[in-house]
């Protein structure tokens, strides 16, 4: 193939066919994709489907712990998983700037293929557009996904009840700080790496062992604080967090202190929040702590009657601080 992406790669003709056949079909190939229809025809083993879509415009395209391709697959898989669904199929749409490196595109597509395999999903349809130089920033990716919601699973943001406990599956802010560090001229890389990972297998095990879980969410843009505010509003409850219980890597906390950022507002791409009835907390924590992606899980707070729609933090000095929704983005183009 050519060394660079050309405008002709997006015109639907020979170059497009070559790109699809020699790169996308080669990496993503399966019996559904290989039919090469304009739309994928699929059957579902269940009656309830979950469908989601997201676009990824992150800069830089490659960061410690991942790249835009891995992020695109993980983001859509995790959006399905926190809805209670078992992810099955993804689409992938590419907007590529003329002149983008073919080698770099190949590496990103291969990363997507590997992540999809790890998650156990198939990329079965997609689209490619090439735009002139200066019309986009190198590469944007859109992914959509379909999953099946098993019988008996009923999860929604409005189901939190007073007395429920809030669990996070691991440390906060790893992804956001890894991206910030890769952009910064300040030498704060240390051991900071994105947590970008598919969570569907862990969530499926959690739902099987603790089927009464009320809410699952992945705290991406806006971080833990913003996500919990959304849950509090949807459920009409208050949420109280314990600052001592919030898990943050020391390297992330140190970088946040240096840059004036707060981990609780930084994006995560491999963690989820769970609102769990008090009687299921021990079971849920047992599942998480035994799993490689849940070994730093923690109970960080509880749902309360007072201050409906609000989230507040019990601080280490004994005070109480209101945590509002993120207003000014600490880090744009994070995903």
Image (cartoon, rainbow, N blue to C red):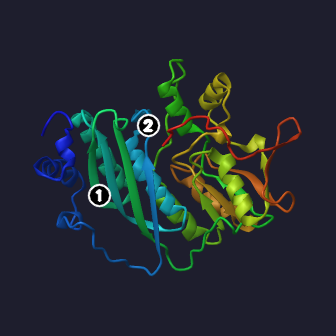
Q: Position of residue 174 (x, y in %)?
A: 56, 38
Q: Regarding mark 2 in the picture, which secondary structure is present there?
A: loop
Q: Where is residue 116 in the image (x, y as percent from the top left)?
A: 35, 54
Picture layout, residue 290 above or below residue 42: above
C-alpha distance separating marks 2 and 1: 25 Å
The residue that appears at 19% across and 48% down in the rendered structure is 23
Picture layout, residue 205 above or below residue 295: below
Q: How crowded is mark 2: few (under 14 residues within 10 Å), some or many (20 or more)?
A: some
Residue for badge 2: 65
Left or right for 166, reference 105: right
Picture layout, residue 333 above or below residue 33: above
Residue 65 visible in rendering? yes
Q: Regarding mark 1 in the picture, which secondary structure is present there?
A: strand
Left or right for 284, reference 45: right
N-terminal of the pair, mark 2 or mark 1, is 2
Left or right for 241, reference 284: right
Count of picture labels: 2
Q: Position of residue 189 (x, y in %)?
A: 51, 24
Badge number at residue 242: none
> Within the image, what quadrant is residue 102 found in?
top left
Q: Spot the residue most to the top.
A: 186
Foreground residue, 85 or 7? 7
Q: Is the C-beta separation of discs 2 and 1 under 8 Å?
A: no
The residue that appears at 28% across and 45% down in the rendered structure is 109
Picture layout, residue 218 above or below residue 322: below
The residue that appears at 27% across and 51% down in the rendered structure is 128
Q: Where is residue 139 in the image (x, y as percent from the top left)?
A: 34, 40
The residue that appears at 27% across and 39% down in the rendered structure is 105
Q: Residues within 10 Å of mark 1 (few under 14, many from 20)?
A: many
Q: Indicate the quadrant containing the N terminus: top left, top right, bottom left or bottom right.
A: top left
Residue for badge 1: 126
Q: Which of labels 2 and 1 is toward the front? A: 1
């Amino acid at each position: 193939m050519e060394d660079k992406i050309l405008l002709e790669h997006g015109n639907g003709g020979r170059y497009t066919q070559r790109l699809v056949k020699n790169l996308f079909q080669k990496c993503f190939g399966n019996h559904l994709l290989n039919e090469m229809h304009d739309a994928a025809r699929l059957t579902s083993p269940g009656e309830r489907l979950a469908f989601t879509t997201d676009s990824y415009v992150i800069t830089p395209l490659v960061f410690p712990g991942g790249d835009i391709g891995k992020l695109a697959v993980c983001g859509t898989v995790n959006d399905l998983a926190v809805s209670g669904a078992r992810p099955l199929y993804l689409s992938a749409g590419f907007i590529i700037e003329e002149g983008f490196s073919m080698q770099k595109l190949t590496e990103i597509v291969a990363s997507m293929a590997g992540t999809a395999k790890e998650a156990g999903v198939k990329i079965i349809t997609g689209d490619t557009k090439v735009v002139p130089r200066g019309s986009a920033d190198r590469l944007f990716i859109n992914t959509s996904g379909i999953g099946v919601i098993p019988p008996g699973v009923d999860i929604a943001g409005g189901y939190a009840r007073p007395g429920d406990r809030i669990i996070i599956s691991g440390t906060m802010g790893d992804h956001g700080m890894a991206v910030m560090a890769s952009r910064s001229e300040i030498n704060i890389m240390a051991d900071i790496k994105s947590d970008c990972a598919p969570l569907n297998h862990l969530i499926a095990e959690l739902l099987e062992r603790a089927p009464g879980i009320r809410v699952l969410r992945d705290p991406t843009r806006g971080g833990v604080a913003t996500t919990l505010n959304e849950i509090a509003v949807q459920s009409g409850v208050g949420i109280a967090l314990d600052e001592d219980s919030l898990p943050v890597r020391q390297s992330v906390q140190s970088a946040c202190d240096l840059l004036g950022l707060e981990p609780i507002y930084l994006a995560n791409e491999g963690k989820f929040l769970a609102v769990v009835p008090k009687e299921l907390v021990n079971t849920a924590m047992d599942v998480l702590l035994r799993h490689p992606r849940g070994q730093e899980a923690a109970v960080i707070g509880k749902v309360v009657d007072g201050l409906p729609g609000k989230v507040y933090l019990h601080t280490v000095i004994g005070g109480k601080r209101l945590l509002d929704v993120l207003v000014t983005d600490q880090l744009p183009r994070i995903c």
